[in-house]
Amino acid sequence: MSLSTRLAIEHPQITTDVVNIAVLPYLAVRHRVDDVPTTVVNGKKVCVGALPEDEFVRRVLGQSRRTGISTARAAASRRAS
């Protein structure tokens, strides 16, 4: 289970989508995803690459608070192997 999924389970105001950018390349273009994994919260790229759990949570929750939107949408994108 991905960290973004676990975060969404623990915080009911957060939803998460894991997207395969090989299948939905327009999302990679829209969010300027060049590397994987990339996490986007409320339309803003908050991290690229794997992070320690505490840093990931800090960035996701911090961005969701800054945007003033109650639902954070963390989209972790990954390419197909």
Image (spheres, grey):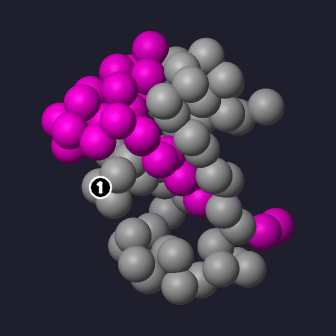
Q: x%, y% of residue 4?
A: 59, 34
Q: Is residue 33 visible?
A: yes
Left or right placement of residue 74 versus residue 61 in this view: right
The 10 Å Cα crowd at callout 1, few under 14, some 14 to 19, many 20 or more, is: some
Q: Quadrant of the N terminus?
A: top right
Left or right placement of residue 54 versus residue 9 in this view: left
**Between 6 and 22, which is closer to the camera in this rendering?**
6
Mark 1 belongs to which amino acid? Answer: Lys
Give above or below for 27 relative to 12. Answer: below
**Residue denoted by label 1:** 44
**Which residue is depicted at the point 54% across and 52% down?**
75
**Between 63 and 20, which is closer to the camera in this rendering?**
63
**Between 68 and 27, which is closer to the camera in this rendering?**
68
**Residue 54 sits in quarter:** top left
Give above or below for 43 relative to 9. Answer: below
**Which residue is depicted at the point 78% across and 69% down?**
80
Which region of the structure is painted magenta? 54-81
Left or right placement of residue 64 versus residue 19 in this view: left
Q: x%, y% of residue 46?
A: 33, 45
Give above or below for 11 relative to 36. Answer: above
> Number of numbered discs present?
1
**Which residue is depicted at the point 66% across and 62% down?**
19
**Residue 64 sits in quarter:** top left
* SS class, disc 1: strand
Q: x%, y% of residue 45?
A: 33, 54
Left or right placement of residue 7 versus residue 2 in this view: left
